[in-house]
Each structure stands twice: as C-alpha cells, then as structure tokens.
Amino acid sequence: MKREISKYGADVLIKKASPVTEFDADLKKLVADMFDTMYEAPGVGLAAPQVGVSKRLFVMDCSKEHDRQYAFINPEIISVEGIQKGEEGCLSFPGIYFEVARSERVVIRAQDVNGEWFTGDFTELEARCVLHEYDHLEGELFINRAGPMRREMVKRKIQKLKKDGKW
Ligand code: NI
C-alpha cells in the first residue's frame, strides 16, 4: 500500500530517527509499503522518515527488476572510500536535482526484516543511494550538501512553489 511522502518542510525529515526494536508484522508491513511507495514515485531509495515514521530503516532498489532486494534496518556504515560527483534527487524534494559529492564506495551492515544482520558492499549509484538514505535517518537532507549559492536557489524555488500552493 502506497503511503504519502513527506516533503521538505516537514519536521520528521530533520529529526534523528530512533532504532527499530520490534521485528514484527507491523515492520514487515511498513517495509512492504515503503517499497510500494518508492516504486510508484518512482525512486531508487526511500527512508522511513519520508513516510512520516521516525525509525532507522530505508529501502533501496537501483535495478530494474523491482524485486524488493534491499531493506536496511538499523544500518551502520562500516567504511567509505573514494569520491564521486553526480546529480542527485530526493522524493521529498520533487523536481529538484543538483550535483552532490559522495563517497564512491560504502560498506554497510544492517538488519533485515527478520532481525538478521547482513553486510553489503556498494559502489557508484548504489553507494550514492545508501549514503543519501542513511543521511535521512540522521535528519540530514541533501540540500545541506549543496554549496551555499545552490542551497539558496533551491530554498527560493521551494518558497515560490509553496506560495503558489504547489509544494
Ligand atoms: Ni531523499
């Protein structure tokens, strides 16, 4: 079931999320709904705060298969290396894209929906996505990774959209 995506301006997006402690049916439903919401949007990653739930989990699928491969619960970044620059967007900032520098590679450990720990090693787009979504759990938004001029431009654009009732 699709859930509503919180847009920039919602308090839940700038709050540090709390750990997931119950690996129950509600969690499985939340993860399933997050995949539905992400695929429908469409996007390649979605963090729980973006659907109004301040919990430490996110989903990701950069493939075309839509096989719901990656749900990261209580993720911990183990290591990062290298640097990549590329255009980035966020489902909480519809229509807004700009260049963001990220690590080229990330190794991360997380729990799956059953509470089992796994380790993932990601590069390129997947590394960018993991790092972007992880930031959401810290209440950190990609706009804070833009340069000061770009950040002002984006904020002005959003203010105008809000004024026009389009945000
Ligand atoms: Ni995002």
Image: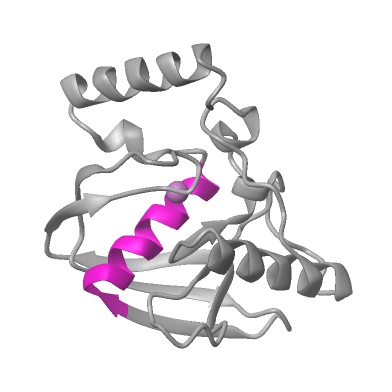
Q: Quadrant of the N terminus?
A: bottom right
Residue 61 visible (yes or no): yes
Residue 74 visible (yes or no): no
> In the image, is 143 to the left or to the right of 29?
left
What residue range appears in magenta? 122-138
Q: Which residue sits at x=73%, y=84%?
A: 114
Q: Main secondary structure of the magenta part?
A: helix
Q: Which residue sits at x=38%, y=41%?
A: 95
- Please state the horizontal and vertical placement of residue 31, each as a whole percent of the image: 69, 70
Above or below 94: residue 127: below
> In the image, is 150 to the left or to the right of 38?
left
Q: Quadrant of residue 104?
A: bottom left
- Please state the horizontal and vertical placement of residue 21, each as a whole percent of the image: 78, 64
Above or below 114: residue 107: above
Q: Which residue sits at x=38%, y=54%?
A: 132
Q: Quadrant of residue 116?
A: bottom right
Q: Is residue 133 magenta?
A: yes
Q: Is residue 25 magenta?
A: no
- Please state the horizontal and vertical placement of residue 119, each as a whole percent of the image: 45, 83
Above or below 153: residue 109: below
- Please state the horizontal and vertical placement of residue 120, each as a whole percent of the image: 40, 82
Nearer the observer, 76 or 48 = 48
